[in-house]
Image (cartoon, grey):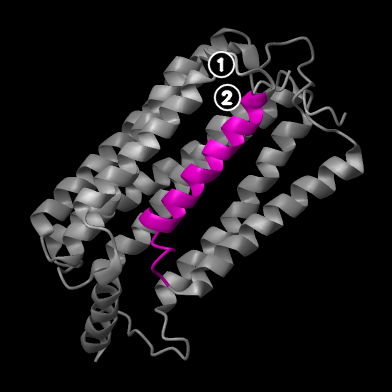
Amino acid sequence: MSAAVEETSMGIDNRKLGMWVFLGSEFMFFGAFITAYLLYLNTTAGGPDGEIFDIVYTSISSFVLLMSSLTMVLAHNAHVHGDMRRMRLWILATALQGLVFVGGQAYEFTKFVNEGLVPTGSPFASAFFVLTGFHGVHVTVGVILLLGLWSYSHTGKVKSDQPLKTEIIGLYWHFVDIIWVIIFVVVYLIPWG
Amino acid sequence: MADTATEATSDVAVENDHHEPTPREYVQIAAALAVMTAMEFSTYFIDFGLLSTPLLLVLMAIKFVMIAGFFMHLKFDTRVFRQLMLLGLGGALTLYLAATLALHEFPAGTGLG
């Protein structure tokens, strides 16, 4: 049994409004971690600092995540036009790119740990792993949501006249991308030293 | 009843989509974002001197606005969503400023430390 959608005085769907309220709070959530990272930039305790980052590798990951936003928005566009076959295809493409990003991050973390940048090694390392790790968790949750949407579109729980469901998951996905746009510049590219 | 209400919501979503970009335009927007990412990447190899950080921040801001505006539909959607995002962003920036000012810990290279 599906939940009833109530009429709202603002004429805005409650589910979409709820997602935006959540995303607003998420900006502050990541804002706190980015602040902590910037505050602890110089507290490496003799361990590795930002010099350890592989910019070429991270740039490729960033590009993959950026392109996943394109496939996500194409999935929504296909759903709006009732083309469920194409919508499923783009959703799978988005999830696949998300998995590539998370896999790349797992590889990067492993490499850093082997080179001496461990989460408990210094305040800098902790702040870095907490910030990028939480982002990775968000991408993973996004992939799960996408695969759920893909699965539900097969079983009929997501119908061709319900593009709002794809749009709401898309909002979350684009948010994850937009946060990485900030992390990529602030953490990896700006030469703070 | 529930289905009718859901359909009504879907209709609103479809109606809103009339002003949104076409798939071709979405690809063009993504291409612009990719070019800006390449420009960001280039700052790692090309020495822009003092312009490096401002250039990166400007490119980041443009990418942010483009993703929020076109992909998240803030350019076409109701202002309430934009305000919610700005509220969150404002909170994050306030937190950063409050923490840095309270602790006098400005990132090296900003000349404020």
Identity of the residue drawn at 38% across and 62% down: B73
Question: Does the magenta run of residues contain A140?
Answer: no
The residue labelled by disc 2 is A188
* Quarter occupied by residue A154: bottom left
Structural distance between the alpha carbons of marks 2 and 1: 7 Å
Q: Position of residue A98 (x, y in %)?
A: 34, 37
Left/right placement of residue A158 relative to residue A103 reads left
Name the chain letter of the residue that bears numbered label 2.
A
Specify few, some or many for label 2: CA neighbours under 10 Å numbering under 14, 14-19, or 20 or more: many
- Residue A53: which disc? 1
Residue B68 % position (x, y) = 45, 55
Q: Does residue A8 appear to the left or right of B9 in the view shown?
A: right
The image quarter containing residue A66 is top left
Pointers 2 and 1 in contact (C-beta within 8 Å): yes
Residue A2 vs B65, above or below: the answer is below
User: Picture coordinates of residue A99 (x, y %)?
Assistant: 33, 34
- Magenta stretch bounds: B51-77
For numbered disc 1, what is the local secondary structure?
loop
Chain of the residue on which disc 1 is drawn? A
Amino acid carrying mark 2 in the image? Tyr
Magenta stretch: helix, strand or loop mostly? helix
